[in-house]
Image (tube, coloured by chain):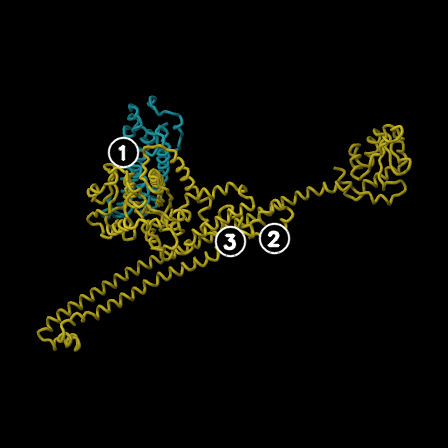
């Protein structure tokens, strides 16, 4: 109020007070005390009404007294005196300050506002500092978040580049294969020509051995022919050598491509290697410091500059997202909705008592990746899979599926739509087969024999015709997840034995399931005429493998079992299970130290909530059980 | 409508899903069907028009997945999502028909074929397959080649027909889900 405007100029108020007392006209209202070391307000009412406004621009006596108190004036009390009465009368107010004396104007400079007052005015400033610190924190966090976004963005860009490289590689490989076939054809025609010529020659040559061959094939051949009939076989040896030479040349071409892949792999490894090493150390040193500011207050200013990096990690890690860990991509909230929805579904699932529920009797819940761009099919497929007690992850197109599997997610079975945007199912399967052997089932309405043989050629294990039926789907699961079944199957035979029916399905055209939904599953081991032998071969081989060594599939995700996981998968994620454990350890440790377990319950919850559904490293850790 | 005796006539199911845009168009055509229709008692196949447009086994297995046979939350949401999906696909078909983009039309046909087949909407599915084939400049069976002009002509009529079939089956389904204002 006024106090502040007056108090701001060192002792303005005191000087005004002094000046007021210099004026003798008001002596009967206010005057110096008898000893000249105090002043007395004799008539309170008059003082307030007439004198205060003249000198202090207000007419509030209480305010005036408060002002005096601020300057450490004290009301002089007379309780201890004989009569307990003020010498100036009962209504008088006498105020006193050691340095406020009549005839001592210089001493006035010593009168200052009391200490508490300045404290009060400074306190708001302190309060202002703390929000400022918080603002700094906030802006730092913003910067950190932006950094994360950038990191993610660059990671994404990089992945898309890798993807396009991969695709080019595959295209290159396909071209090579085509060239290879051309070469083979050339070789074969060449061989045929040579062979035909040789036979002609030998027919001619036998009656007249020396001459005939000499004209046609030269001296040496003729001589060999004549001297040793067994060397006849050696004659086509030179064309055969030629052929094998050609073959080895094309082989060399093929060899170039894996090298590119390896190179790419190295790049990713190097990049991930450098990125994954620092954080564990940083977590230890940095976490407490950056947790500090909210409580430490005063020290926060020193943290402000140049310590943005420190903030990146805590922000990231309490979120479960650290730009430095590519696998944290699974923790990004906006990728979660489908999973979250899934999880609620599972919960609903558990509380259910539906007859539609079929428990095929798994020894553990199979992890299924459903790759499908059509939401209707995806939802129904997921629903059926849930009904079969499977855990489902879904991908909207082939690209997402490849990325998921390449990121280390392990599944027991992949159900793959064929026609999808971005990357079709066949290409996706082809790419996945470069590093993973998980059974992949084509889920499609395109089931002509040439389509089907193409699916198998690209590494698909089976075909589930669309629209799929519950029974067809269950059959697929039981067929390809036999190793996950409890020893004694309690399934009713009607569902498990569509084999005889399958033969009625020899027409490979689409069929409406109207007539026989139960039989709509495709049975590759019962080859329909026209189906490529590759088809039956593959799945039989696969089944055989499963039966012979059921462990093979259960151990697949464990590092150090690179069986079939040739180049790509060995890259960033192979050492992950251990790493993830280590990291989880860090997290717990940190939060224990800082008592931060409850600091961010929402984020934490999110982190753990992901765990069971995230088929990545966690599942690989569960596997060996 | 004349279904006051329905056992499933609870207000909870009567939410408007905003898909009645095209419904009134063919409203009169089937109106009398519904008039003398008895309660279908939860059996969709008893609804007139269902038999030839819905594949019972396929649709039934989706209904089986409903937790509550009165609310039919799961199947209903799938079916209603399909309505929206179909409408937007038809819009895309129309614009691509104008652009004469056969390839996209074929893809759209394939897309809608997948979901309609999964729901067992056999008529719509068959027509979508034709759209898919025509878009590839093949005949309806996808066997013989046809010219682009033929394809566009056939596409125009087939898309029209598919829409009609869709709206027919949509009515049946809405009736089944007690949503027929």
Left or right: where B74 falls relative to A93 = left
Q: Circle 3 sits in a helix, a strand or a loop, which is it? A: helix
Q: Chain of mark 1?
A: B
Q: Are marks 2 and 3 in contact (CB under 8 Å)?
A: no
Q: Is residue A213 above or below residue A414?
A: below
Occupied quadrant, residue B133? top left
From the top left corner, tell me how far across and down residue A197 is, in percent.
15, 69
Left or right: where A269 falls relative to A378 = right
Disc 1 crowd, CA 10 A, few/some/many (<14, 14-19, 20+): many
Instruction: State whether discs 2 and 3 lie on one chain.
Output: yes
Q: Nearer the viewer, residue A170 or A133?
A: A133
Residue lying at 31% horizontally and 45% vertically, measured from the top left: A481
Q: Circle 1 sits in a helix, a strand or a loop, which is it? A: helix
Q: Which residue is mark 3?
A: A279
Q: Which residue is mark 1?
A: B56
Q: Which residue is mark 2?
A: A305
Quadrant position of the N terminus of chain A in the picture: top right
Disc 2 to disc 3, how far (Cα)?
20 Å
From the top left corner, tell me how far across and down residue A330 is, in percent.
44, 47
Which of labels 1 and 3 is toward the front? 3
Mark 2 or 3, nearer chain start: 3
From the top left corner, tell me how far across and down residue A129 is, in percent.
65, 45
Q: Colour of chain A?
A: yellow
Q: Is residue A227 above or below residue A149?
A: below
Q: Is residue A222 above or below residue B10?
A: below
Occupied quadrant, residue B6? top left
């Amino acid at each position: 109020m006024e106090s502040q405007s007056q108090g701001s100029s060192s002792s303005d108020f005191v000087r005004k007070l002094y000046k007021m007392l210099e004026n003798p006209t008001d002596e009967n209202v206010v005057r110096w005390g008898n000893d000249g070391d105090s002043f007395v307000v004799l008539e309170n009412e008059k003082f307030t009404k007439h004198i205060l406004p003249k000198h202090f621009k207000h007419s509030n006596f209480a305010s005036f007294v408060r002002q005096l108190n601020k300057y450490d004036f004290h009301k002089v009390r007379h309780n201890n005196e004989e009569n307990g009465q003020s010498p100036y009368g009962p209504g008088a107010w006498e105020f006193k300050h050691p340095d406020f004396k009549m005839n001592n104007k210089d001493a006035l400079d010593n009168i200052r506002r009391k200490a508490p007052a300045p404290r009060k005015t400074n306190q708001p400033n302190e309060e202002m500092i703390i929000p400022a610190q918080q603002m700094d924190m906030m802006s730092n966090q913003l910067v950190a978040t932006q950094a994360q976004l950038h990191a993610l963005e660059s990671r994404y860009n990089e992945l898309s580049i890798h993807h396009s490289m991969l695709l080019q590689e595959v295209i290159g490989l396909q071209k090579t294969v085509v060239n290879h076939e051309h070469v083979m054809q050339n070789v074969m025609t060449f061989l045929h020509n040579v062979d035909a010529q040789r036979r002609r020659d030998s027919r001619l040559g036998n009656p007249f051995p020396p001459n005939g061959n000499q004209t046609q094939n030269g001296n040496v051949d003729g001589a060999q022919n004549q001297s040793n009939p067994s060397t006849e076989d050696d004659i086509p040896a030179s064309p055969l050598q030629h052929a094998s030479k050609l073959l080895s040349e094309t082989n060399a071409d093929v060899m170039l491509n894996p090298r590119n892949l390896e190179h790419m792999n190295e790049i990713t490894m190097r990049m991930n290697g450098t990125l994954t090493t620092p954080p564990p150390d940083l977590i230890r040193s940095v976490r407490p410091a950056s947790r500090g500011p909210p409580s430490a207050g005063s020290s926060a200013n020193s943290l402000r500059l140049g310590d943005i990096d420190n903030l990146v990690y805590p922000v990231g890690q309490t979120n479960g997202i650290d730009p430095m860990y590519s696998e944290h991509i699974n923790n990004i909230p906006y990728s979660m909705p489908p999973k979250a929805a899934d999880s609620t579904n599972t919960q609903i699932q558990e509380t259910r008592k539906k007859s539609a529920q079929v428990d095929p009797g798994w020894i553990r819940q199979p992890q299924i990746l459903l790759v499908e761009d059509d939401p209707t099919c995806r939802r129904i497929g997921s629903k059926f899979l849930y009904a079969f007690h499977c855990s489902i992850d879904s991908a909207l197109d082939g690209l997402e599926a490849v990325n998921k599997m390449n990121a280390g997610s392990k599944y027991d079975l992949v159900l793959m739509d064929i026609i999808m945007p971005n990357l079709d199912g066949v290409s996706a399967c082809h790419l996945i087969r470069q590093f993973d052997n998980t059974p992949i089932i084509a889920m499609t309405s395109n089931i002509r024999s040439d389509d089907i043989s193409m699916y198998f050629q690209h590494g698909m294990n089976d075909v589930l015709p669309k629209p799929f039926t519950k029974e067809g789907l269950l059959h697929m699961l039981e067929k390809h997840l036999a190793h996950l079944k409890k020893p004694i199957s309690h399934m009713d035979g009607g569902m498990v034995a569509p084999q005889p029916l399958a033969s009625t399905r020899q027409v490979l055209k689409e069929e409406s399931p109207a007539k026989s939904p139960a039989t709509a599953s495709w049975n590759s081991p019962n080859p329909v005429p026209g189906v490529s032998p590759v088809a039956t071969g593959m799945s039989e081989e696969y089944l055989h493998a499963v039966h012979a060594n059921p462990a093979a599939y259960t151990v697949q995700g464990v590092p150090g079992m690179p069986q079939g996981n040739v180049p790509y998968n060995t890259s960033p994620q192979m050492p992950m299970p251990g790493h993830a454990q280590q990291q989880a350890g860090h997290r717990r440790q940190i939060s224990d130290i800082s008592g931060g377990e409850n600091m961010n319950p929402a984020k934490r919850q999110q982190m753990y909530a992901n765990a069971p559904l995230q088929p990545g490293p966690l599942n690989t850790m569960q596997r060996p059980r | 409508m004349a279904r006051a005796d329905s056992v499933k006539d609870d207000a909870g199911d009567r939410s408007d899903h905003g898909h009645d845009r095209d419904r009134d168009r063919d409203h009169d055509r089937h109106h009398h069907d519904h008039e003398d229709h008895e309660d279908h008692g939860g059996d969709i196949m008893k609804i007139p028009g269902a038999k030839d447009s819905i594949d019972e086994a396929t649709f039934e297995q989706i209904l089986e997945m409903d937790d509550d046979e009165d609310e039919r939350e799961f199947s209903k949401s799938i079916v209603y999502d399909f309505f929206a999906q179909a409408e937007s696909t038809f819009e895309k078909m129309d614009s691509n028909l104008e652009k004469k983009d056969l390839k996209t039309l074929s893809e759209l046909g394939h897309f809608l074929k997948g979901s309609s087949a999964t729901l067992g909407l056999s008529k719509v599915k068959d027509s979508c397959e034709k759209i898919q084939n025509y878009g590839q400049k093949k005949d309806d069976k996808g066997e013989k080649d046809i010219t682009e002009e033929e394809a566009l002509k056939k596409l125009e009529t087939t898309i029209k027909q598919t829409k009609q079939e869709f709206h027919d089956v949509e009515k049946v389904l809405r009736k089944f889900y007690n949503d027929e204002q």
